[in-house]
Amino acid sequence: MLEDLSIGAPVISSDGHQIGTLERIVVERDERRVTHIVVDPGLLESGNLLSPGGWEKPRAHIVPISAVQNIGADLIQLTLDQRAFAKEPLFEQEYYANADLQTGEVQADGEKPRFRLGELIHYIATAAGLGAAPYEPTTEIAFRESTESAEIAAGTPVWRRTPHEEIGVVERVLVDAETSRIIAFVLRRKGRGGKVIQVPIEAVSDVQDGVVHVKLSEADLAKLQPYQPENRSK
């Protein structure tokens, strides 16, 4: 049986509360197996909105795939209640931007020192007299992504190597319910009215943070079946 992980789907706790949406999926690269899901409760619900540096504070929680009880039509239910979910580790990513030390203007790579994005926002806000406080990492953040894993988020681009071009973005991940191994990616083709198709895992050459590479010719792409929930590959 296949499970259909739809990025952006609502996530429900065992006591019936909507605790967020599926923000991203963490995958073990070698085995092509889903190990965790990342659930974003939203800026307001997280309590970060009015806290110092709140916009840059991590708010999404990372949950092991074993805590997923049921995956329905565009809905995910956990075995965790609302309180237990809040105790799951926060998930943090580091984003960097190059910036001029005096003006905060973003520069091309190699021209100026790097700022963490949160520090850059704080710098610009303070210079403008907004009095923002910087985000300081806390000991609550316990999850550190393995170097053997990769993340798939909404809009993760899918590229083929020959010819080297982007062919679409990931919308869903089809997973074997017993093994948590990925069976297929559901891909929306580029362009207006892009078709939604299933790309079998055998056609995937590698999965990295922020990108999926496939080995598909035009003829191969033309043969791929459209995604239809009732006709998913078994």
Image (spheres, rainbow, N blue to C red):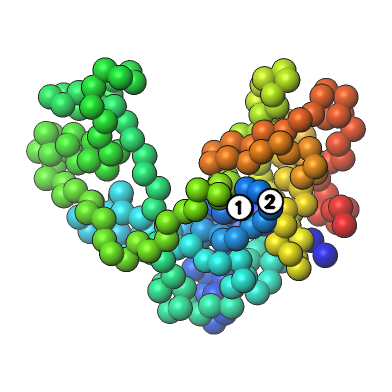
The residue labelled by disc 1 is 27
Q: Residue at x 20, y 23 (%)?
A: 100
Q: Is residue 215 above or below residue 90?
A: above
Q: Is mark 1 on a helix, strand or loop?
A: strand
- Please state which of residues 111 and 234 is positioned toward the viewer in this rendering: 111
- Please state which of residues 14 and 173 is positioned toward the viewer in this rendering: 173
- The answer to whether residue 186 of the structure is visible from this angle is yes
* Mark 2 residue crowding within 10 angstroms, few (<14) / some (14–19) / many (20+): many
Q: What element carries label 2?
A: loop
Left-right relation of 199 to 42: right
Q: Which amino acid, mark 2?
A: Arg
- Please state which of residues 23 and 75 is positioned toward the viewer in this rendering: 23
Discs 2, 1 touching: Cβ within 8 Å? yes
Q: Is residue 220 above or below residue 58?
A: above
Q: Which residue is drawn at 83% across and 49% down?
A: 228
Q: Is residue 166 above or below residue 134?
A: above
Q: Which residue is drawn at 30% across and 59% down?
A: 48
Q: Which amino acid, mark 1?
A: Val
- The answer to whether residue 156 of the structure is visible from this angle is no
Quadrant, the C terminus: bottom right
- In x, y percent, where is residue 9? 60, 57
Q: Is residue 85 above or below residue 211?
A: below
Left-right relation of 104 to 58: left
- In x, y percent, where is residue 230? 86, 56
* Mark 1 residue crowding within 10 angstroms, few (<14) / some (14–19) / many (20+): many
Quadrant, the N terminus: bottom right
> In the picture, residue 37 is in which quadrant?
bottom right
The residue labelled by disc 2 is 32
- In x, y percent, where is residue 184? 76, 48
- In x, y percent, where is residue 31? 69, 53
Left-right relation of 164 to 151: right
Q: Which of marks 2 and 1 is nearer the N terminus?
A: 1
